[in-house]
Image (cartoon, rainbow, N blue to C red):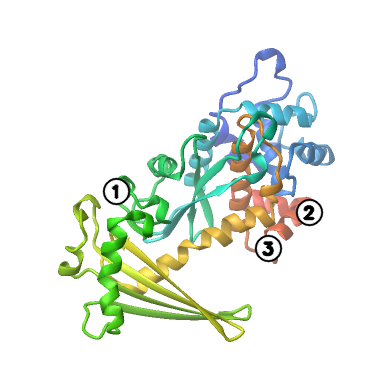
Amino acid sequence: MPDTPVGSIRKHFSKVSDPRIDRTKRHKLLDIICIAICAVICGADNWVEVENFACQKQVWLRTFLELPNGIPSHDTFGRVFRLVNPGEFQRSFLEWVQAVNQLTQDQVIAIDGKQLRGSHDQSSGKRAIYIVSAWAAANHLVLGQQKVNDKSNEITAIPELLKVLEISGCIVTIDAIGTQTKIARLIVEAEADYILAVKENQGHLYQDVTALFDYDRRCNFQEAPYEYAKTVGKGHGRIEVRQCWSTSHPEYMESIRNRHNWKGLKSSIMIEAERIVDGKSSVEIRYFISSLASDARRLLKAVRCHWGIENGLHWTLDIAFAEDQNRVRKDHGPENLAVIRHMAINLLKQEKTAKGGIKAKRLQCAWNEEYLLKVLAGA
């Protein structure tokens, strides 16, 4: 049904296996998935709210869904998404994103993790799950996500996510936990570039990179082979000044021990960020390595884009979708619901005609079926 409001969604999610035995299949799996996506777009944050949405919109839903036995109960939604294979669900999400969106050359893809705090289950000893997401900074899109295994951390989840993403020609930015030689190699082998944060827990790498800059910084970079860029931003009662020094000078880069283990390594970067609020100044200095050649302006812009994942995705999930308060927590339910929230964010951010933030757009979708159709048209 490619011409229906959810035709593209049905097409790409038709590969998801139905985990139910025959006698419990009163409702079609694709109907359940499509209702859940529409409901979350319209403001539903749990399965009870999804059922309530569907009951109120039953006449409208029947214009493009079969609903042979009416509206599923909230228990049905909860049970189905607890059982749906999250790997299949995420692969369908990836196919859907790649089919309806095209990344631009040199686009920054920020990779970062977020804990779903409400997903913990104290009675069963289950910890809150952690999801690593990839965010296209220019397109404002979630490109994919990977759950961190219970007994692991982001270091193991990031490579798995990179393997399924189409990142050729893009710039991948990752915080210090992802500064690993294996991850750098995966990015370069995918024909992309990286900018990786360097912090104290990187041992020799941190010592070597900071040593490159410390002496020259004390001498105000008078005779050092650096490129330099500066930006000044004002807003929300504060001034933010960012300065970047970068170098690809062979003598400097050769001083980094084990540099050949970092596939494609070409430059080292120092960024000084000063924030002035009410006349009081605070300064933070951060270091990075990159497979890009030294270009301070380009590198400074890419690093700045990385933090868009905090405001554009993580903050939105907490404020507009109340993700941290969500108590869906059994089996695969939290992970699959996280994918649905990511779909909703993608569709809502791609719709540009309405004013207001994501929360306001969700309300407008609930109130106005014509606007909801316009949002779904992005699918």
Q: Considering the numbered disc 3 on the image, is that residue within a helix, a strand or a loop?
A: loop
Residue 362 seen by the camera: yes
Q: Considering the numbered disc 1 on the image, is that residue within a helix, a strand or a loop?
A: helix
Question: Where residue 291 sits: x, y (%)?
Answer: 28, 59
Name the residue located 49 percent from the left edge and 34 percent from the top edge.
Answer: 151
Q: Is residue 348 left or right of residue 213?
A: right
- Give the answer, above or below, for where 7 lies relative to 75: below
Residue bearing the label numbered 2:
368
Q: Considering the numbered disc 2 on the image, is that residue within a helix, a strand or a loop?
A: loop
Question: Where residue 272 sits: x, y (%)?
Answer: 41, 75
Front residue of this view, candidates 325 and 309: 325
- Give the answer, above or below, for where 86 lies relative to 39: above
Q: Is residue 225 left or right of residue 373?
A: left
Residue bearing the label numbered 3:
357
In this rendering, the label closer to the viewer, 3 or 2: 3
Q: Is residue 86 left or right of residue 152?
A: right
For the N terminus, give its image quadrant.
top right
Return the residue found at the far right: 56
Question: What is the distance, in whole Å, between disc 1 and disc 3 at their CAs?
Answer: 39 Å
Residue bearing the label numbered 1:
181
Q: Amino acid at mark 1?
A: Thr
- Quarter residue 237 falls in: bottom right
In this rendering, the label closer to the viewer, 1 or 3: 1
Q: Amino acid at mark 3?
A: Gly
Name the residue located 20 percent from the left edge and 57 percent from the top edge.
Answer: 257
Q: Is residue 38 left or right of residue 241?
A: right
In this rendering, the label closer to the viewer, 2 or 1: 1
Q: Earlier in the sequence, mark 1 or mark 3?
A: 1
Front residue of this view, candidates 225 and 17: 225
Return the residue found at the far top: 23
Residue 292 seen by the camera: no
Q: Amino acid at mark 2?
A: Asn
